[in-house]
Image: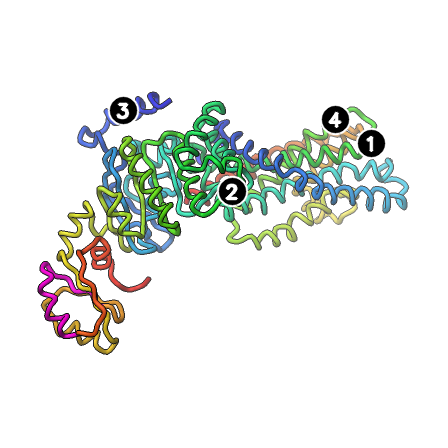
Amino acid sequence: MNKGLLSVTPAFIKVWRRNAQVFITLWKFNIFPSLAEPLLFIFVFGLGLGSYIESMEGVPYIEFVAAGIIGTAAIMQATFECTYGSYFRMKMQNTFEGIISTPISAQEVSLAEITWGATRGLVNALLVLVVLLLMGVLHRWQAALVPVIMFAAAFNFAAIGVFVTSRVAQMEYFHFYFAGFILPAQFLSGTFFPIERFPDAVQAVAWVIPLSSFVDISRSLMLGRHDIYLLPEAAWALASTLIFAELAVRGMHRRLVE
Amino acid sequence: MISARSARTHDSIASSDKRHIDMIVEARSLTKRYGDLTAVDAIDFGFEAGRCYGFVGPNGAGKTTTMKMVYCIARPTAGTLKVFGLDVCEQPREIKAGLGVVPQENNLDPDLSTCQNLIVYARYFGIRHEDAAGKCDELLGFMHLMEKARAPIAALSGGMKRRLVLARALLNDPRLLILDEPTTGLDPQVRHLIWDKLLELKERGITLLLTTHYMEEAQKLCDEVLIMNEGRKVDGGSPGSLIRKNVPAQVLELRVDLAAAGEAVARFPGMEHQRSGQNLYFYSRDAAEFDEIISAYPGAERLIRPASLEDVFLKLTGMEIR
């Protein structure tokens, strides 16, 4: 019997619906706080710091940084959802145990959590995108494709989050994950300035972080750039997403069905 | 849906040993190890349809682990375990479709209302929304929770939550209902209500499998009791036969001074006894044999009563606290 992604049936959508139902019940508590950070970033980096920077890579700074802010908003939300959120559902509420006592499998619960984290990330990315649109930062129709990339980025980080959740012995370990990976990812991934400004060694590390690829692809779409480098970036974005999702699903199965 | 399920189960039973035709659950050398700890150590059991089985044993005896293996959320390390004739490692999804589970800890969804809890859970079993709504009303009625249908979980008392978990376990019309300490921490009213409902379910032909720390509960509900200790099955049988087999019919409970307790035990070496601090328990077939002891300790608090499953339990699993 396959213990990974291949064992998953469409039944995982039922668990996604459970999360969506709870989210809708509590939407006021969910939407507004998660928008605070991206809006602050737009204000501080885009408008505040941006007023001192004439242009970056040939475009106004706010247009450059837009992809970074959307990407950060997407992955942060997905990460919170699939670390603290998933852990809480798993350990505090025993929700997962209740679900896997039905025909739903642990792998389906994991994929549902990842997909749900990705959905939360997408919702955030869309809201930030609307704000940027209203600000007149978006000029090209290709920006309409950005939500697709952002869903994928959020999915990727949701998968890493669920994988980490499947391994931590207690919630406090997430502090290390946030300090050691998420925070660096947020600032090293070419979000606020080009990765090329880093020393070579740091550049190599930065490109391994999947967010770099997602942000660069989104930025290229928004600014109408086409470059051969986007192909390996897309390949790594896709491959890392699959790898992390497989690891997460297997890790969660191991944890839940010991 | 039910007919499809039973048809499938019949196929697999037909292909297996004819003798086990009515076995709902069957374990052979079932073992579960967590690292160095052997939680369940090569136990065997077989459960027939339509009866009630109870696991009793001290905390850490392996009861919950055994139950979790039956409802497929813990994988056996060794041995075989079949539920409805299906292997728990091979076909957990098919098995779980026919199970109702009341876990030791309530795991209701605190963010959903009473009714939403049932509707969302019904979805996991593939029950259509229209059917689920009807089922929800029926089960809330059955468990006397109708007036709480729209209440948030936080507004329910402990007894109500437990009844709701039981209602939830019945959504899919299970053939086997698994209950891990169903009445722990509940008031007598709720306990009696749950007992009544469980016996009603048994009369409807549902097989019950429970764990409990209350020997009274095991005696009241179970056709067969399995006593576990340190991962092993110590004894098993009907409550009556376990009592007859393991302890004399009459018990004298005596509370004496701590100094007198050791001496009292030594003074009546011929009589079966147990000691817990100052409390002494003497066992005899004939209550008249207690007279000598009673006259030796005239001032001591005492009680003569028939032997119960609790006496069997303490005898087989020991008095010491773990």
| Disc 3 residue type (three-letter) | His
Disc with the residue nearer the chain's start (3 vs 2): 3
Judge depth for marks 3 and 4 and give the one in front. 3
Residue B283 belongs to magenta span? yes
Specify whether residue A126 is in view: yes
| Disc 2 residue type (three-letter) | Ile
Q: Are marks 3 and 2 in contact (CB under 8 Å)?
A: no
Residues tagged by mark 4 and mark 1 found on one chain of the structure: yes
Identified at 23% across, 35% down, the residue is B48
User: What is the number of callouts on the image?
Assistant: 4
Residues tagged by mark 3 and mark 2 found on one chain of the structure: yes
Residues tagged by mark 1 and mark 2 found on one chain of the structure: no
Judge depth for marks 4 and 1 and give the one in front. 1
- Pinpoint the chain carrying mark 3: B
Residues in magenta, as a range:
B280-297
Mark 2 to mark 4 CA distance (whole Å): 41 Å
- Pinpoint the chain carrying mark 2: B
Q: Are marks 1 and 2 in contact (CB under 8 Å)?
A: no
Crowding at mark 3 (Cα within 10 Å: few <14, some 14-19, many 20+): some
User: Mark number for residue B10?
Assistant: 3
Q: Are marks 1 and 3 in contact (CB under 8 Å)?
A: no
Q: SS at mark 4?
A: helix
- Pinpoint the chain carrying mark 4: A
Circle 4 is placed at which residue position? Answer: A144
Specify whether residue B94 is in view: no
User: Mark number for residue A134?
Assistant: 1
Of A92 and A179, nearer the camera is: A92
Q: Are marks 3 and 4 in contact (CB under 8 Å)?
A: no
Circle 2 is placed at which residue position? Answer: B153
